[in-house]
């Protein structure tokens, strides 16, 4: 049953490796290279959007596995997508900062 009070945000909306005609909805300067479903869910959680995630194939690219996050409606969808894209880059940046630190700890 379709939930009319929620927006669906596909990973493909934020993928910088895709063209707009392939499903990307954000400008390249706001897109993330190959985002993970967990990163998208974390970004939505940080924005208090109460996300629920699901593995699925984006309709126009059925041959490739993707995923989506369903969030409660708060704003027009495009404004929400841009806000999530900015937060997604913050989440990715924090993950990259933690990764070199973990590698340093392993070497000790």
Image (cartoon, grey):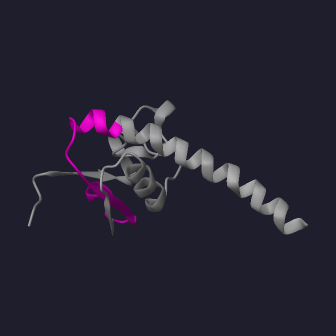
Q: How far across and how far down the image is residue 20, in percent? A: 36, 38
Residue toward you, 29 or 82? 82
Q: Quadrant of the C terminus?
A: bottom right
Magenta stretch: includes residue 61: yes
| The image quarter in which residue 101 lies | bottom right
Left or right position of 58 against 88: left
Q: Is residue 100 visible?
A: yes
Compared across the picture, whether 94 is left or right of 99 comes to left
Q: Residue 85, percent across and down?
A: 42, 40
Q: Is residue 37 left or right of residue 54?
A: right
Relative to 56, say whether 97 is above or below.
Answer: above
**Residue visible at 34% across and 49% down in the picture:** 48
Q: Quadrant of the N terminus?
A: bottom left
Q: Which of the pair 70/63 is nearer the observer?
A: 70
Residue 10, placed above or below residue 65: above
Residue 26, horizontal then vertical, whole percent: 39, 35
Q: Is residue 57 in sight in this rendering? A: no
The mark tally for this picture is: 0
Write the residue at 22% across / 36% down. 75
**For the magenta stretch, what is the residue range?**
57-81
Q: Find out whether residue 80 is within the magenta segment.
A: yes
Image point (30%, 50%), residue name: 49
Tell me which corner region of the image, top left, top right, bottom left or bottom right, holds residue 51: bottom left
């Amino acid at each position: 049953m379709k939930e009319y009070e929620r927006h669906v945000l596909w990973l493909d909306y934020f993928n910088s490796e895709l063209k707009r005609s392939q499903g990307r909805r954000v400008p390249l300067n706001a897109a993330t290279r190959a985002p993970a479903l967990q990163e998208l869910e974390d970004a939505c959680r940080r924005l208090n959007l109460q996300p629920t995630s699901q593995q699925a194939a984006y309709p126009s690219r059925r041959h490739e596995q993707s995923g989506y996050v369903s969030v409660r409606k708060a704003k027009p969808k495009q404004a929400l997508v841009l806000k999530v894209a900015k937060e997604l880059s913050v989440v990715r940046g924090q993950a990259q900062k933690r990764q070199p630190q973990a590698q340093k700890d392993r070497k000790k």
